[in-house]
Amino acid sequence: MAGPSPSFSRTRVRWSPGFFATSLLIRLPFFILALDFFDVGVFGHIIRSPDQSNLTSPLTNLTPEQPNFDSFNIGGALYSPASNYVSLPSLPPSCSMYNAAGNECPTTDMMAVNVTYDDCTDAWTLCHCGSANMSLDDAVERLGKVPVGLRKFIAMTLVLPGEETHAYSLTSGDLHMFGDCSMETWVHEATHSYDYAFGDPISGGQPWLDALNADSCATDTYGTSDAAEEFAQMSVLKTFSLIYGALPSGWDPACMSNQLAYMDTLPLYDKTTLFADTCATSPTSVSTPDGRLGTVRAIKIDGPSPVPGAPLRINPNANPTAHVPSSTSEALTPSSTLIAPISVGKDPTDNPDAENKKGNAAVPLLHHSRWQWSRLLYSCVAVVSILGVY
């Protein structure tokens, strides 16, 4: 005779508070990665020296006015000066160190050129990786479209491949541009070069910090990263407002009035300096409100003599929300305020392991890299496992 059927009971496991906390800590990185997956509107960042680590505190008192800068562009309004470049016989050390398998230019076919524009006799050195998304000619054009008052502070520029648009700057003034960078990203990174040209960063000075503490809004989500990133983002908005006479649609100046007022105290953000026809602007144009008159590294100042009353090198009639072609074959119609038609003269004649932020790519979800899809998968697994525990 068969015995009684076995019976089973389900026992609910009661996890201790310590196990609960440990479980969350283990899974926390995956949740952070999941949040990062959906964050597509940020620019590049500045690589600082260790003694400047105190400048990286998030701006928790500020609320972003917008998530990103995807709703406008300044590229159509920025002037393209005529240019000329010559190849260099060898790579500068600050470029060659990144030209290796597994590094930023993994195809090891980087070339270096010295570029001059019609607004400056001094040359900009640009190192171009053969597998970069931007062609050499496009990179030369976009570097030239950075307003000369800001461009003069850029040291070396490296143009590199990237599945996503992103960039970073070194305190030396070097720019590392990955993918197909928009003009907003170029201006953002050039601002980092300006910010650190005086030694101690302008964005770390008390006047800027006071402005941040007095306001209630930041430019966008990425601007809340720290004081330097908000300064660079504010530079983009200030450039827009100097061109068009107002901030882009969706930005209210009232909640960040102190930041805007501070930018007005910087001689660089005067139309006749920022959008001049020469890099040889007055020495006072590189001063700061706290009295620092000189830079701690070389900047470009050898150019044509300023022409009093010369038209500004901008096109305020350009549509600030229109698509700006990345191909130079698509010409933009200039306004009468320009010195010459928008054209591009193309007559040929230490931190490789730094973390890179995404650029202002406005990348559709399906265009994220394989690594990002992996992060999303890991995050979903973490969520499912958490639900399974509870």
Image (spheres, rainbow, N blue to C red):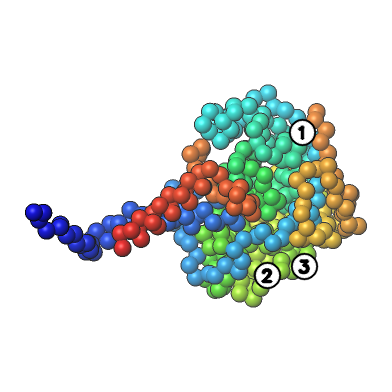
Element type at mark 1: strand
| Front one among 115 and 62 | 62
What numbered label is drawn on residue 209? none
Image check: 389 left or right of 221?
Answer: left
User: Image quarter for residue 222?
Assistant: bottom right
Q: Residue at x 62, y 38 (%)?
A: 161
Q: Position of residue 152 (x, y in %)?
A: 70, 47
Is 130 placed above or below 224 here? above
The residue at which mark 1 appears reads as 85
Pick whichever, 188 or 9, lies toward us. 9
Q: Split into 4 quadrants, where in the image is the C terminus?
A: bottom left
Is 346 located above or below residue 376 in the figure? above
The residue labelled by disc 3 is 245
User: Which residue was labeled with disc 2?
Assistant: 250
User: The N terminus appears in which quarter of the rendering?
Assistant: bottom left
Q: Which residue is pictured at 22% across the width and 61% down the height? A: 10
The percent coordinates of residue 25 (x first, y second) are 33, 56
Query: How far apart are the alpha carbons under marks 2 and 1?
Result: 40 Å
Residues at marks 3 and 2, CA–CA distance in whole angstroms: 15 Å
The amino acid at mark 2 is Gly
Q: Mark 3 vs mark 2: which is more N-terminal?
A: 3
Out of 104 and 14, give the one closest to the viewer: 14
Kindly identify the amino acid type of the residue bearing the numbered disc 3: Gly
- In the rendered image, residue 3, in percent from the top left (x then y), is placed at 9, 56
- Upstream in the sequence, badge 3 or badge 1? 1
> Callout 1: 10 Å neighbours few (<14), some, many (20+)?
many
